[in-house]
Amino acid sequence: MPDVTWVLEPDIFPETHAPIRNAIRDRGHRLVDWSDAWWSDGVPSRVPNSSVVFHGSLGNASRITNELKWAPGSFCPVDAFRCSTWYESARQWLVHKDWHICAANELVANVTAIAKQLGATDRLFVRPDSPLKPFSGRVVDVGTLTLAKLDHGFYYDDDSIPVIAAPIQKIGNEWRFVIANRSVVAGSAYDSQTRKPLAAPLDSAAAVFASSLASTIPAPEIVYILDVCECNDQLRLLELNPFGGADLYACDATAIIDSVSAIAAAA
């Protein structure tokens, strides 16, 4: 396989990166540790612009896509991963049957009416539209919702960021799958007792469902993350995430390195 340069952010996902590092070396690719100093000092010459893959924080993954000429880079086109971009095309499989997209300040000002429109009463699920997740998705009380309860002023200052409001759903088991060229190449689940991640067999019901989704819905990027969950005794699509900034948990590191490196070598 042609030589590919993998750039890993060393302080992000240390448990995930241990097997990834081993797989990179075992497959004969180059491994370089990312440094934030590169934003001011410049990327060192040992890191090429082609056949290079980044994996680390979402913030750096996004900035690399926007500011560096790496190919393929971090697989993080932010707009393609916004919920408002892909929710409608995935409606029939999505965990949310109904949702409302608006600015955070609009949600706070009109939360009672929006909740009623969605058929909710005392509580709603709220998450940011952006895959960069300026706040984590959460259940909020309709009667006491404020911007502060959406972490405004802590992680972001723009009170007009788009958010998704939806009725609460009871979520069961969850799985994470790595999609490359519209195919599932690796998956991870959680042990129901220990909550530790473990590899998900690619012939499992969740993997087969993820494979069907990956071959059907518009792909936000050639490599991306697809999360599946149990909801109301059915498998449903939970969310899509950029590969370059997503925890890979117990996904098969060798399968990821082989699949993504092949794509990077051709970029």
Image (cartoon, grey):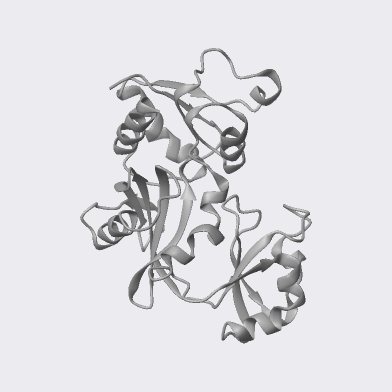
**Image coords of residue 179 (percent x, y):** 35, 47
Q: Is residue 132 left or right of residue 93?
A: right
The foreground one among 170 and 156 is 156
**Image coords of residue 87 (percent x, y):** 49, 64
**Image coords of residue 90 (percent x, y):** 42, 64
Res 127 visible: yes
Residue located 55% across and 73% down the image: 99
The foreground one among 199 and 44 is 44
Q: In which quadrant is the N terminus drawn?
A: top left
Residue located 44% across and 35% down the image: 17
Q: Is residue 205 left or right of residue 99?
A: left
Q: Is residue 66 left or right of residue 245?
A: right
**Residue 68 position (above or below residue 201):** above
Q: In which quadrant is the C terminus drawn?
A: top left
Res 122 visible: no
Residue located 72% across and 60% down the image: 151
**Residue 240 position (above or below residue 16):** below
The foreground one among 110 and 245 is 110
Q: Is residue 266 left or right of residue 161?
A: left
The foreground one among 165 and 220 is 220
**Residue 213 position (above or below residue 243):** below
**Image coords of residue 12 (percent x, y):** 54, 38
- Residue farthest top in this picture: 45
